[in-house]
Amino acid sequence: MADNDNVQSGKNFGIGTAQKVEGYFLKGSAHLDWGVKDRLSRIFNPRSGKTVMLAFDHGYIMGPTSGLERLDLTIVPLIEYADCIMCTRGALRSVVPPTLNKPVSLRYSAGSTVLTDLNDECIMDIEEAVRLNASLLAVMVAVGDREHEGLTIRNLTKTIDLGTKYGIPTMGVTAVGKELVRDARYLAMASRVCAENGAHVVKTYYCEKDFEQVTNSVPVPIVIAGGKKLPEKEALEMAYRAINEGAAGVDMGRNIFQAENPVAMIKAVREIVHNNAKPDAAFKLYEEWKK
Ligand code: R5P
């Protein structure tokens, strides 16, 4: 038992110095619970307010797609340069060294593949996400998909309910069906639907025209997917424009791991996202680091 005899009366109460009322650096996140904010602060750098997530969950719908044939050889060396990794539980347990200690955006919904009909998904047990120490739960949301829209929005809603019990935030991942156009009107609607249903972060695509309408109409942080592989300079330009038009980061996959030099590419993307480097300067660095 603690020794009661030496308990001294407190003296230093800082009388006259009001306790600071802390704000929170992420858009729309000031009223969230402590655990949620702690996890978001591991994903988004509190200094820059931004994140570079490395996405390599593609195998769950595509199998061993280009660049992801051997996650241990191509992805593991990139992880140290990412602020957060987005992947499946299978990839985590089989190849990602826990000693790297990176926050995980866990692919939390899964179902059909590219061979049949995308977006016919279910969600995992929340205890599994807790066991894996997930910092974010990533759920596919297919707004405008006649067959699966309702199912995927219910998946999102259920995930947010479950995650909230344990202080784990949720990211709505907007899936664009083949027949839908990725314009600002559609992306703003899909992203806003995620946020209104309670998503703490939204992942969507960049669009050349009026992307600011997307970021401005969504009250929580938006990160952009990279989409199909582009020439490296164009991918850096896209990241630059997205950040300067209000995105809080990137959740990029193919434009990093399919680059000619993936390590140089993720480092160049970091320069843009965290240091606001111009695309030309970032590309110059890419060329240097590539050597
Ligand atoms: C999409 O559903 C997957 O979850 C990917 O994580 C996402 O598309 C980001 O990867 P990429 O930058 O290759 O588009």
Image (tube, rainbow, N blue to C red):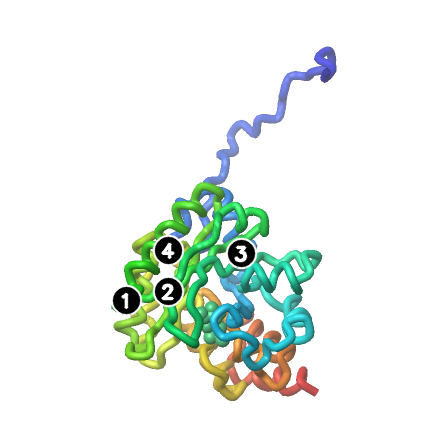
Q: Which residue is drawn at 57% across and 74% down?
A: 271
Quick check: 206 above or below 202?
below
Q: Residue 156 carries which label?
A: 4
Q: How far apart are marks 3 and 1 (CA)?
A: 40 Å
Q: Sequence order check: which comes first, mark 4 or mark 2?
A: 2
Dot 1 beta carbon under 8 Å from ligand 1:
no
Distance Cα–Cα, label 1 vs label 4? 16 Å
Element under label 2? loop
Is disc 4 placed on a helix, strand or loop? Answer: helix
Residue 66 image position (x, y, % from top left): 56, 81
Q: Residue sitting at 50 percent across and 83 percent down?
A: 229
Tell whether label 4 touches label 1 (CB within 8 Å). Answer: no
Q: Nearer the viewer, mark 3 or mark 1?
A: 1
Question: Which amino acid is tagged 3?
Answer: Pro
Residue 143 at x, y = what percent? Answer: 30, 66
Q: Does 206 sit left or right of 84 as displayed?
A: left
Asked whether the beta carbons under mark 3 and mark 2 sit within 8 Å of each other, the answer is no
Q: Which mark is residue 13?
A: none
Q: Earlier in the sequence, mark 3 or mark 1?
A: 3
Q: Mark 2 points at which residue?
A: 120
